Image (spheres, rainbow, N blue to C red):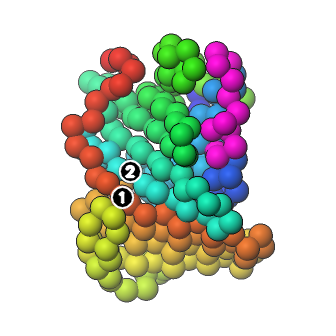
Amino acid sequence: MIAKRGIVFFSLVGLLLVAACTLYAAPSGAAMAYEYQFSAFYSGFWSMGWFGYKDGNYKTGQGTVWKFTTTGKSQPITFERALLKVNADSSQWWRLRLDMGKKSILYEFLVAPDASVTKVRYKDPESGAVDEFVPSQSMQMPSAVPSNMPNSRAEMAKYKVNQQTITVQAGSFATDHYLYADATSQGSAELWVGDTVPGYMVKSVYANKKNDQTVVGELIQVESGVTTALGSY
């Protein structure tokens, strides 16, 4: 099983690049390649700011679509996550979809009550066949939150700058504005968080001075009525 997702802010810049590369890399029918690809996507995109899916306020059928732009990269990456279904045992079906240019990959995965991923389904873009895998123990994600980073909403309070109403493609939202900087990694995370938005995140700016890269994320759509596209349940 894939372990609980840790919150590692400044790895996002690098992981966005890894995710973009693996979007093109998985050959048709190569289950192991898709497992590694899913792991790269999950690590790079699933925790939005301080908020992983377990922290989110999604209702069943709600989804959010984000656009990420990285300095030096002409093509943005579009990312969707949506809560598809909550089962009787409190496990949840989620969707993760990434688009970059003409390339697209869609995963639907089952999350246990302890926040571990227990099953992943995907559609092979070349054959059109739907397949699935159980994540291996070797594909575990970081589970520890670094001690110098906030690991709860309460701990975020000391990084709050002000309150702002900001406008993004999805609309205008009242937000709390946060700024977190880490001297060790020379990185910073600037976040605009709105309680009325599924997943809370409205806009983010991640900067890494070491490699002079910045990733800007913006909410472009809030969805409703989202259901399985792969017959997962």
Q: Residue at (54%, 40%) from the top-left corner?
A: 102
- Where are the magenta residues, as a range? 19-31
Residue 153 sits in quarter: bottom left
Residue 40 sits in quarter: top right
Q: What amino acid type should be assigned to the residue bearing mark 2? A: Val
Q: CA distance from mark 1 to mark 2?
A: 6 Å
Residue 229 seen: yes
Q: Position of residue 213 (x, y in %)?
A: 69, 69
Mark 2: few/some/many CA within 10 Å (<14, 14-19, 20+) = some
Examine the rendered structure and indicate whether residue 183 appears above or below residue 74.
below
Residue placed most toward the observer, 115 or 198: 198
Q: Residue at (64%, 15%) from the top-left corner?
A: 29
Examine the rendered structure and indicate whether residue 69 appears above or below residue 205.
above
User: Left of 32 or right of it: where is 162?
Assistant: left
1 and 2 marks in contact (CB < 8 Å)? yes
What type of secondary structure mainly makes up the magenta span? helix
User: Left of 11 or right of it: where is 5?
Assistant: left
**Residue named by callout 1:** 220
Residue 195 seen: no
Q: Position of residue 72 (x, y in %)?
A: 68, 66
Verify whether residue 24 appears in magenta. Answer: yes
Q: Position of residue 129 (x, y in %)?
A: 51, 13
Secondary structure of the residue carrying tag 1 is strand
Examine the rendered structure and indicate whether residue 9 appears above or below residue 189.
above
Q: Residue furthest left?
A: 225
**Residue named by callout 2:** 65
Give the mark nearer the N terminus: 1 vs 2.
2
